[in-house]
Amino acid sequence: MSAIQEVVTEAPVVEAVPKRAMTLGAGASLVMLALLIVVPLFVKNFIIFQLTMLLIYALAVLALNILTGGSGQFSLGQSAFYAVGAYTAAILMEQYNVNYALTLPVAGVICFAFGFLFGQPALRLSGVYLALATFALATAMPQLLKLGVFEPWTGGVQGLVVTKPDPPEFVQSTLSWFHLKMSQDMWLYYFTLVVAIAIYIFSVNLLKSRSGRAFMAIRDNEIAASAMGIDVALYKTLAFGVSAGITGVAGGLGAIAVQFVAPDSYTITLAISLFLGMVVGGVGWLPGSIVGSAFIIFVPNIAESISKGLSGAVFGVLLFLVIFLVPHGARQVAMVAQHWVGKLRKR
Amino acid sequence: MELFTNQVLAGIATGAIYACMALAVVMIYQAIDHLNFAQGEMAMFSTFISWQLMQWGIPYWGAFVLTLAFSFAAGIVIERLLFKPLAKAPILTNVAGFIALFAIINSCAGLIWDFTIKQYPTPFGSSPFLGSQLISTHQAGMIGVTILLLILLYFFFQYTRVGLAMRAAASVPESARLVGINTSWMIALGWGMAAAIGSIAGMLIAPVVFLEPNMMGGVLIYGFAAAVLGGLTSPFGAVIGGFLVGIFENLAGTYIPGIGNELKLPIALALIIIVLVVKPAGLFGRPIVKRV
C-alpha cells in the first residue's frame, strides 16, 4: 500500500452529558431511598433476593457508566472484572475463612489493580478497537478460570459454593425485643443497600471532583484535554481502575448472594447485559443504572413469557425500540417527566 | 522438522476459515467504519438458508448462488431499515444495535431450525488432498475459494467504477458526495457485499464445525483477531492475517506446554491485544491520522 495517510474526523464515542444532568435531585433521591428501604419489608424472600441482585447489577452498571459516560471509554469486558471480584470474595471466604464483609474491599482493590493494568494497553485503543479488546477479554475469562493451574483455589469447572451469611447477633437481639426475626435474605439485602449507597455517593462525588472533570474533558475532546494539561494516560487508566474496582465489589456481593461461583456464570453474555443496562439506563446518568439493571434482570423473563423460543429476538427488538425511540434511555424519560411536573406546578 | 511442517500445513487449513471470516469483517469495516458484532450470526443464518434450500432438493451450487443473492439483499435491507437511521449516532448506539441484531438473528435461527447439530455437505469431497493426511480436499478447496475471492475483490475495487466509488465514499465521504457519488448507497452496497462474503465463509466453514446456531462464536473472535492482525483497512492483510492466526494457533498448541484446547480463546485475546499495542494499524493496514 502507498504511504498515503488517511485523515478522518471520528464520530463521538458517546454524546456529551452535562455534569448537572448526571445525578438526581435531592427530593427524588430521598423518595428512591425510602422505596428501597421499605419495599423489602413487605415481599417474599425470593423477591428480596431479586431486589438484592437488582442492586448488585445496578452497581456493575454504575461502574460501566463511570467508565463510558464519564471518561468516554468502551468496555464489553466488565464480566471479567465481575468474575475476578466474585472469585476473590469466594476464595477468601471459603479457603481462608475471612469474614464476608472484609472480602469486599479486597475484591475492590484487586480489581482496581487489574483494571488499572488492563487500562495500560487499552490506552492505545479507542472506540470500536477498545470494544473489541474488552470483548476478547470477556470471552477468554471463563477459560482462564477453568485452568488446571488455579484449580486448588478456584475449584475448576465445578466452581465454589459460598455460605450465606447470617444477620449479626446485635441485629437479631435488637429485633427480638419486638418479637421479630430477620431472614438471611433480608439481612443481605440491607447489607448490599448500604454498600450500594456508599458507592453511589462516592461515584457522584468522584464525578464532581477534579478527577471527574478531567474524565469528562477527555471524553469530550482528548486532544483539547491534553492541551489543557490533563494527564490523559493517567486519568484514562484511572477510570478503568475505578470502574473495575466497583465492578469487583459488585461481583463479590453477587457471589455472596448467589452462594456459588463457577466460570460459566461469567461469560460474555453478562458483559453484554451490563452494557445494554447502561444503554437503557442512559449513558452518563448514574441513577439510570438501577433502571438499566431492572431491564437486564426482568426483561429476559418478560421476553420468555411472551415467547419461549423467541426470547432473544424479543429482547433484541426491545433494544432496537429503546435505541430508536428513547436514544438517551431512562434519562430522557426522566427529563420529560420532570418537564411535565414543572409545568403542572406552575399552574 | 516434519512435525513443524505438518503443523504449519494444518494451521493453513484452519487459517482458511479465519481468513474467510476476516475478509467479511474487513469489508464491513471499510464500508461503515464499525466492527459488526453480528457478522458471524448473519453468516450463520445464510448458511442455514442454503441448508434449507438443499433439503428442498436444490443442488449445491444452485443453493449456493441463491444464498449469495439472498444474503446480499438481506445485508442491504438490514442497513436501510436499521442502521441508516443510526449513521450519525454515537459509536455506542451502533454497538448496541449490532448486539440487538445478534440476539434477534441467533434466536430466530434457533426457533426455525432448533439447536441440534446438523451435517453440512461439501462440494470438494473430504478425501486427503494430494496424498497428505493433514489437508483434505475440502480444506484445499476452501483455501482456493478464499484466494479467488480475494483476487475478485481486488479487481472489483481497483478496476470497476463502482469499486472506485465505494473506496472514495469510504475514505472521503464529503468529497465523494461532491463529485456525484451516492455515498449512502455505497454503504448499503458494502453491507450487502459483506453479508454475501460472510455467507460464503459460513458455507465453507459449516462442513468443518457443523451447522448450528452458535457455530460462529469462536470463529468470529478469530476472524476479528485475523482482521486486526492484517490491518482492518486491507482485505489482503485480512486473508494473510487469517492464515497467520491459524498457523500461530497450531504452533502454540504444539510447542508451548500447557496450551491445549482450553486456552485457544485466550491466545486469540493475547494476539489481539499484542497487535493493537505494538502495531495498531496491523501488518498491512494504513495508519489513520485523526483530525483535531
Image: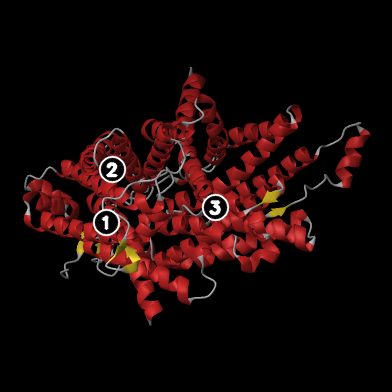
What residue type is disc 3 on?
Answer: Ser
Which chain is indicated by disc 2? B
Earlier in the chain: of badge 2 and badge 1, it is 1
Mark 1, Cα crowd under 10 Å, few <14 / some 14-19 / many 20+, is many
Dividing the picture into quadrants, the one containing residue A232 is bottom left
Which residue is situated farthest in the top direction here? A347
Dividing the picture into quadrants, the one containing residue A6 is bottom left
Residue bearing the label numbered 2: B88
Residue drawn at (89%, 46%) of the image: A169
Q: Is residue B65 left or right of residue B250?
A: left
| Residue B23 - label | 1
**Relative to A287, residue A117 above or below:** below
Query: Do marks 2 and 3 share a subunit?
Result: no
What residue type is disc 1 on?
Answer: Leu
Q: CA distance from mark 2 to mark 1?
A: 25 Å
What residue type is disc 2 on?
Answer: Lys
| Residue B262 - label | none
Q: Circle 3 sits in a helix, a strand or a loop, which is it?
A: helix
Q: Circle 2 sits in a helix, a strand or a loop, which is it?
A: loop
Which chain is indicated by disc 1? B
**Relative to A229, residue A318 above or below:** above
**Relative to B113, residue A148 above or below:** below
| Residue A79 - label | 3
Which chain is indicated by disc 3? A
User: Which one is closest to the eye, mark 1 or mark 3?
Assistant: 1
Residue B151 coordinates in the image, percent (x, y): 15, 60
Query: Do marks 2 and 1 share a subunit?
Result: yes
Residue B75 seen: yes
Residue A2 coordinates in the image, percent (x, y): 15, 69
Residue drawn at (21%, 47%) of the image: B193
Residue drawn at (30%, 57%) of the image: B138
Q: CA distance from mark 1 to mark 3?
A: 29 Å
